[in-house]
Amino acid sequence: MKILHKINLLYFTFFPQFVFATSTAILPDGIARVTIKNSMPCVYLSNGKAIARITLDGAQRGSIDKNFLLQKGNSLTQCVNYNKNTNELKYDTPYYIYINENLNESLRSSHLIKFCISRNNDILQLVQINDNAMETKCSTEIWKPQKYYGGLFGWLEKLKDSVFNKDIIEYK
């Protein structure tokens, strides 16, 4: 065993260009949803499970744990308000919300919602985010749930959603 360890050490010392690490990106899965309720963004999970933790990034940062949620967020009618004060909302600025079903889960296993809030004549509207390599900015397209169809059976999942979840658009 010690010899194998030494061989690995020598290999990585002389050939460091072959050593790299990867991590899985958190991509939209279509389960986390957002709507406007009482002039505030309100989040929920479409799979019927309650929200245990909400982590905010982008326009605002912070987190809300289950102690404050009390078995909410499992449906549109039980959605969790993003904020309590409309004066704190930032318009035309990307919001990223990570939602966990379990407090013990890491951020990597969370559901992601990406959106912007636009305000036109005092009417709030959720819009899509345009992501590209150079910059991230808000679009004028109405927000819809997004889902990444990757992996070996992504095409099959996309076909299923085209029949049963017609409101989901493909994340590209």
Image (cartoon, grey):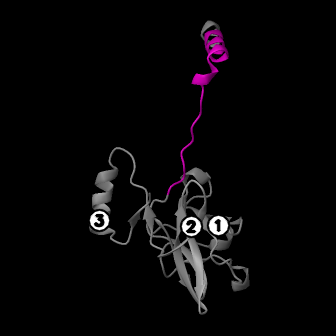
Q: As drawn, is 164 to the left or to the right of 150?
A: left
Kind of residue at badge 3 = Ser
- Expressed as whole percent of the image width and height from the top left, the position of residue 103 reads 62, 58
Pointer 2 residue: 51
Quadrant showing the C terminus: bottom left
Pointer 1 residue: 66
Q: Are marks 1 and 3 in contact (CB under 8 Å)?
A: no
Can residue 43 be seen here? The reply is: yes
Q: Label 3: how many residues lie within 10 Å, few (<14), some (14-19) or many (20+)?
A: few
Among numbered discs 1 and 3, the one appearing first in the sequence: 1
Image height of 118 relative to 48, above or below: below
Pointer 3 residue: 162
Is 19 in the magenta?
yes
Secondary structure of the residue carrying tag 3 is helix
Among numbered discs 2 and 3, the one appearing first in the sequence: 2
Q: Are marks 1 and 2 in contact (CB under 8 Å)?
A: yes
Highlighted range, magenta: 6-27
Q: Label 1: how many residues lie within 10 Å, few (<14), some (14-19) or many (20+)?
A: some
- Expressed as whole percent of the image width and height from the top left, the position of residue 42 reads 57, 78
Q: State how far apart marks 1 and 2 are (Cα).
A: 7 Å
